[in-house]
Amino acid sequence: MGVELVTSQLPKVFIARPPQGGIPDRLRAVAEVEVWPGDRPPSKAELIAHASSAEGLLTSVSDRVDLEVLNACQSLRVISNMAVGFDNFDIDEMTRRGIPAGNTPGVLTDATADITFALILATARRVLEANEALLNGEWTSWNASFMLGLELSGATLGIIGLGRIGLAVAKRAQAFSMRVLANSRTPRPYAGIENVSLDRLLRESDIVSLHVSLSEQTRHLIGKSEFELMKPDAILINTARGAVVDQGALAEALKSGTIGGAGLDVFDPEPVSLDDPIVTAPHVVLLPHIGSATVVTRTRMAEIAIDNLIAGLIGEPLPNCINPQVYGSR
Ligand code: NAP
Ligand code: GLV
């Protein structure tokens, strides 16, 4: 009897960012798994080098899967994003090639709405400034005009994009007795929320919060002319995507006092450079893209992203498919 050479018959998957909780056995049972070891995301060349023979790919928001990557990785049969947003994907090209792509909607809605509200409270009530003043020894006595901010009760919150997260933020605002306006492509009737034009929302809101997904239609939706419509003490909150805002124009608007403040969890590009004018602009609270960063949420995102990957590998429809058109009418 000759020597039997045993090689893995399992399809290869490349995991560009290790998911919270590690790689589950149910994935190892159906795939030969390679996990990117670095703390930083792979560069495009590294992504291509590792995914060129992979049939499955698991990515995060920092991994761009564009035409160049798709051309170089011809074996891919499923691509799973550990995020709800998928502006890092060339989704039209994936669909054209019949590659199902997955995302993780819903499970991160509350965590992201919470961080949006953390930014609303921190900017409106000057939480970081007050903390810094205390640490600098500026709290010498109670002073009736010290650190005055915006009272949320009775203030108007304008939500741009009344999707899952926009609505969850609106509900939180109603619990704070705020008046809520929305500007939404698809009106989503909800008690107490008035759907208005973008101009009216910008003119009437004390706080404007962005919740649209990023696409060519929403890139730089908010720029110089939109800031000029806003109240001079209005606050802009962005937990959607950095490029929905013209970040240079935002830094200018803050410096010139065209608007009063900003709370940002997302930037263009990410990570934001410490030399970027937005970092030194006045009245800003800046977070490093932590909208979904709770243990529960990141664990559930990982489960869904892995479920999508496994389904694609075994030829089943993805439980959360961004481009179900790839399945035709089956
Ligand atoms: P969603 O339910 O799909 O909501 C997206 C909203 O954007 C919908 O109201 C949608 O309107 C609107 N929209 C999309 N394209 C538009 C366009 N061209 N013009 C006008 N409105 C448009 O998504 P979600 O779960 O709420 O998430 C929203 C976004 O939040 C994600 O795409 C992601 O970028 C961001 N996000 C960030 C974090 C973070 O960590 N900071 C975490 C999660 C999500 P229609 O209903 O008409 O489609
Ligand atoms: C995070 O930014 C997401 O889109 O899930």
Image: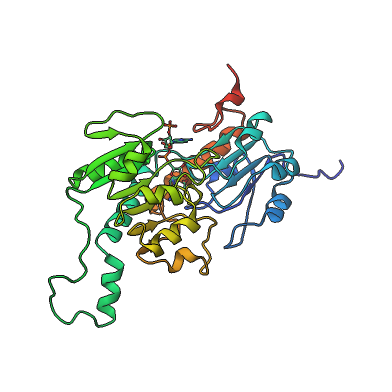
| Image position of 260 with respect to 136: above or below | above
The residue shown at (69%, 47%) is: 51
The residue shown at (52%, 38%) is: 217
| Image position of 313 with respect to 59: above or below | above
Counting labels gives: 0
Q: Nearer the viewer, residue 23 or 236?
A: 236
| Image position of 321 with respect to 128: above or below | above
The answer to which quarter of the image holds residue 40 is bottom right
User: Could you say where residue 289 lies in the image, as x and y percent from the top left?
Assistant: 45, 56
User: From the image, which quarter does the N terminus lie in?
Assistant: top right
User: Could you say where residue 188 lies in the image, as x and y percent from the top left?
Assistant: 33, 29
User: Could you say where residue 221 lies in the image, as x and y percent from the top left?
Assistant: 47, 44
The answer to which quarter of the image holds residue 131 is bottom left
28 on left or right of 284: right
Q: Return the residue found at the far top.
A: 329
81 on left or right of 150: right
The residue shown at (55%, 54%) is: 18
The residue shown at (71%, 50%) is: 48
- Judging from the image, the colouring scheme is rainbow
User: Could you say where residue 190 lies in the image, as x and y percent from the top left?
Assistant: 26, 31
Q: Nearer the viewer, residue 25 or 104?
A: 104
74 on left or right of 174: right
User: From the image, which quarter does the C terminus lie in?
Assistant: top right
Q: Nearer the viewer, residue 253 or 117?
A: 253
